[in-house]
Image: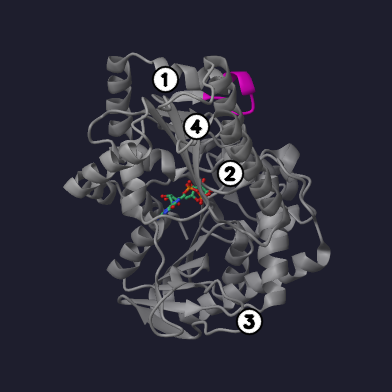
Amino acid sequence: MHDFVIVANRLPVERCDSGAAGAWRPSPGGLVRALLGVLRERDGVWVGWSGVACDVAGPSPSGIFTLDGVDLAAVDLDAAQVAAYYEQVSNGAIWPLYHDAIRPSVYDAESWATYRAVNAAFAERAALVAAPGATVWVHDYHLQLVPAILRALRHDLRIGFFLHIPFPPQELFMRLPWREEVIEGMLGADLVGFQRGVAVDNFCGLANRLLDLRVDDHTARTADGRSVSVGSFPISIDVGEIDAISARPETASAALAIRARLGHPDVVLLGVDRLDYTKGIEERLHAFRTLLREEGCRSGVVRPSRVMVQIAVPSRESVGDYQSQRERVEQLVGAINGEFATLGHPAIHYLHQSLPLEELIALYRAADVMLVTPLRDGMNLVAKEFVASRRDSDGVLVLSEFAGAVDELVDAIVVNPHDPDALVTALRTALTIDRTEAHERMLRLRAAVAANDVNRWASRFLGQLQVVPA
Ligand code: GDG
């Protein structure tokens, strides 16, 4: 029994490539490390799925096990549950709908029944490991029904829910066949948190419209007489950790080596994203191609003057929309290189790989222009990591106005990535910006990122959860 429980789709582990079969290690990522820190402080437990279907060959953790001093409680999912709950509903219906419906969602009642059953399984697991009066923090769009199911099982718990992705406006959310159930599910929490104020407004409006609830001053009164607080808690990164890695002499030399390997271009432009259609990778590549065409950069030039590096981390590869997105991106990279590369010098260096964090930070340091141009994004931590890496206060951030990060990073070059001309203009601005202005902007960006790191985010959320009237 634990006084603090985190519930998330994935356990914070990944299978070791080498070593003993069935060995697991903490998965990389600032959020996981930050939440593991919160868990350790509070002697908590993390409830989640291992990422491997339990009826698929290969060992997966089950029951409660301990990793790096933290208790983990695995929820077993079989392949059929993964297909329905994770691929069809979470990533095939909810993810695109919540990202401005930029891909059509597929709504299937049978898969929804599995989503509901899997949410119930997560809630039951949490109910088993939570001590009397414990705090339970439920995360993200995979588990929107967990708060209400858990409350029905355990009235004594204090329950928080945080959504990492956008929460859509009414006219989009109303498409969801299970719209009342989702709002009721989230309202099982004492505190519902979003990345941005606009999501808070969307949610409060929908609670009023769909369930006829009174919502005053971001507090909803439920039919059973409870008060549910709703607020915005913009997530962030571990600024200290990124800064410490960036400060290492080996990071500085790795950054120099990267520029040398790229052929000492005048300008390095960088994109780092999961390969997801929400991230605007294709639109960004089109803009880069237009820029190169305008500048008349043709094959035959000995040294490339502008080089783009695009890291596209493999993601959700079993989902059809992700496979076609990958094909389009790779086709476009090939076409641009075909047009602008010289022998030994591609115009775009494209890696469909995940890199160690140290290499990622060296890339951030090596870049002149960071392109963060999602079509819609809950927050976007890459933008914040880039800024936190730039101890030299150099580098220009081009940031989509559709990323949550734009609320804080107002000194970026802000762009509408849906507008092809605006994207090209933003690239041009980034390439020609006055050095002093770029420096001043970066100083202000760094101050903004330093003011809100991931530990502050977690303590703000959990602090507010403790003071919500039960
Ligand atoms: C969701 C929301 C919200 C990327 N490439 C590598 C690598 N990464 C790391 C980055 C960053 C993280 O992955 C990506 O975070 P994002 O925020 O950009 O995006 P999502 O995965 O879509 O996350 C998003 C977030 O939740 C948190 O609430 O901001 O809006 O969509 O930390 O560094 N890490 C390593 N190698 C890589 O190649 N090690």
Q: Mark 3 points at which residue?
A: 56
N-terminal of the pair, mark 2 or mark 3, is: 3
Query: What amino acid does circle 4 point to?
Result: Thr
Q: Residue 407's spot in the image, x, y percent?
A: 45, 31
Q: Is mark 4 on a helix, strand or loop?
A: loop
Query: Dot 2, crowdedness within 10 Å: few (<14), some or many (≥20)?
Result: many
Query: What amino acid does circle 1 point to?
Result: Leu
Q: Residue at x 50, y 33 (%)?
A: 347
Q: Mark 1 points at which residue?
A: 431
Please say whether residue 279 is one of the residues in the magenta stretch. no
In the image, is the residue at mark 2 within 8 Å of ligand 1 by its beta carbon?
A: yes
Q: Is any part of residue 451 visible from this angle? A: no
Query: Dot 3, crowdedness within 10 Å: few (<14), some or many (≥20)?
Result: few
Q: Is any part of residue 338 visible from this angle? A: yes
Tell me: residue 26, above or below residue 34. Answer: below
N-terminal of the pair, mark 3 or mark 4, is: 3
Q: Is mark 2 on a helix, strand or loop?
A: loop
Q: Is mark 3 on a helix, strand or loop?
A: loop
Q: Mark 4 points at which residue?
A: 342
Q: Which residue lies furthest to the left in this view?
A: 249
Q: Residue 460's spot in the image, x, y percent?
A: 36, 49
Of badges 1 and 4, the one in the foreground is 4
Tell me: residue 315, above or below residue 206. Answer: below
Query: What amino acid does circle 2 point to?
Result: Pro
Q: Nearer the viewer, residue 256 or 380?
A: 256
Horizontal side of residue 323 vs 164, given as left or right: right
